[in-house]
Image (cartoon, rainbow, N blue to C red):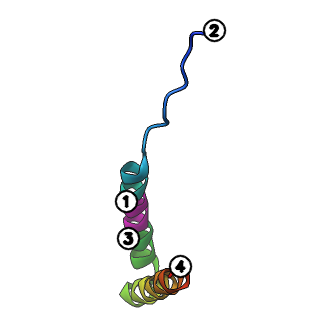
Amino acid sequence: MSEHRISAAPDYTNAALTMLGVNLFCAFLAIWALYGLLPVLLVSGVLNHAIDRLRARRR
């Protein structure tokens, strides 16, 4: 046990961002099927605005 070396954790950033995109697509598809295109456009606009605000806050 004492010879076991702890190595660096793998970087799963790309995999996590890819799965986020897939899940977001599925959520938009479900919203579109249930309520139509307008709510999808509104949700995507709100998400875009929130991301822009977070980017501005980090600077």
What residue is disc 3 on?
A: 29
How crowded is the residue under tag 4: few (<14 C-alpha within 10 Å), some, or many (20+)? few
Q: Main secondary structure of the magenta part?
A: helix
Q: Residues within 10 Å of mark 3 (few under 14, many from 20)?
A: some
Amino acid under label 3? Leu
Q: Identify which amino acid the numbered label 4 is placed on.
A: Arg
Given the image, on which type of amino acid does mark 1 rest?
A: Val
Which residue is at a point 43% across and 60% down the rendered structure image? 20
Looking at the picture, does residue 18 appear above or below residue 44?
Answer: above
- Front-most of residues 51 and 39: 51
Within 10 angstroms of label 1, few (less than 14), some, or many (20 or more) residues? few
Return the x and y of residue 48 as percentages of the image width and height: 43, 84
Q: Earlier in the sequence, mark 4 or mark 2?
A: 2
Of callouts 3 and 4, the N-terminal one:
3
Mark 4 element type:
helix
The reply to whether discs 2 and 1 touch (Cβ–Cβ < 8 Å) is: no
Whole-number angstrom distance, CA of label 2 to CA of label 1: 40 Å
In which quadrant of the rendered view does residue 39 lie? Answer: bottom left
Q: Which mark is residue 58?
A: 4
Residue 1 — which label?
2
Q: Which residues are magenta?
A: 20-26
Q: Earlier in the sequence, mark 3 or mark 2?
A: 2
Disc number placed over residue 22 in the picture, else none: 1
Lower sequence index among marks 4 and 1: 1
Mark nearer the N terminus (1 vs 3)? 1
- Looking at the rendered image, the disc whose residue lies closer to the viewer, 3 or 2, is 2
Q: Which one is in front in this view, the residue at disc 1 or the one at disc 3? A: 1
Give the residue displayed 53% in from the left and 81% down from the top. 54
Q: Amino acid at mark 2?
A: Met
Q: CA distance from mark 3 to mark 4?
A: 31 Å
Q: Is residue 4 above or below residue 50?
A: above
